[in-house]
Amino acid sequence: MSLPESDSTYTADAIAAGRSTYPHPKPVLDTGALAEAIRVQLRTWVTAEVGIKVPGPETIAAEPAESIAQFLGEITEYARFYGVERGGYAEPWGIAHLINAHTETMYAALGRGDAYLLGALYSLIAARAHLRDGYEGRFELGPYGGSGGDRRTVNESALIETVRVQLATWVPDTFGTEVQLPGRWETRTAADLSDVIGAVIEAAEAKYGDMDDDNSIQGMGHLANARAHGLKAGYGYGPAHLFASLGALVLAAAALT
């Protein structure tokens, strides 16, 4: 069935992509991929806000968990000593999330599992909201609702919640009430999350669709990629597509905000 001409070109492309073998390469969800996702997320804000240059991917390739833990230690020490100029509660909350992210990566470096790397990425998403955007509200420090048995694996529910929080850090301020995000743990399946991403891309297409600047074009491209991966995950192709969708959303937020 073809889509009506009035439907978003980006959405149509993403749906077509989600039903094909695109995106390439096939997404991977392992220690190296999680560490690289952390490195890429740091590139979207750390140099500008903290003043520390983020290294290239080759620097973490050999020992991803250990390397990313060491680098986060340097960032955290610098931020604690010099501070980050944000008013109100934004700075202390942001530094708290940064410290938590460093702690998570140290656990991962000690061999306690990749779930701690996802936990670090979650905390860094919240840290960026505070230290870059000045958000003064509170994002939960633990991505899986606290310590204990929930933190043993990187599973679909943990990835879905991490994506939801990433969206919460920028979608309401960018699109207002046009996109209603679900509350904590309310999105229970990859198919539900795909619908949320679909609503985001529709709002983005309305706002940025006629713009031809590089940031708008790149942001819409990343959103289309996120939607494509979300659709693949919704059709049961595995949690690696949820993780890839998260990575695309991180880049979309960097381009559009």
Image (cartoon, rainbow, N blue to C red):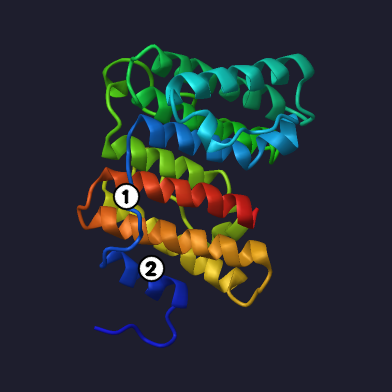
- The residue wearing badge 2 is 14
Viewer-proximal residue, 186 or 244?
244
Question: Please, what is the three-letter code of the amino acid marked with disc 1?
Answer: His
Residue positioned 42% across, 26% down in the render: 117
- The residue wearing badge 1 is 241
Label 2 residue SS? helix
Residue 136 in sight here: no
Is 2 above or below relative to 217?
Answer: below
Viewer-proximal residue, 221 or 167?
221
Is 185 above or below relative to 84?
Answer: below
Horizontal and vertical percent position of residue 43: 62, 39
Q: Earlier in the sequence, mark 1 or mark 2?
A: 2
Question: Please, what is the three-letter code of the amino acid marked with disc 2?
Answer: Ala
The residues tagged by marks 1 and 2 sit, at their Cα atoms, a distance apart of 13 Å
Disc number at residue 129?
A: none
Task: Tell whether 58 sits left or right of 130.
Answer: left
Label 1 residue SS? helix
Horizontal and vertical percent position of residue 154: 30, 31
Residue positioned 34% across, 43% down in the render: 186
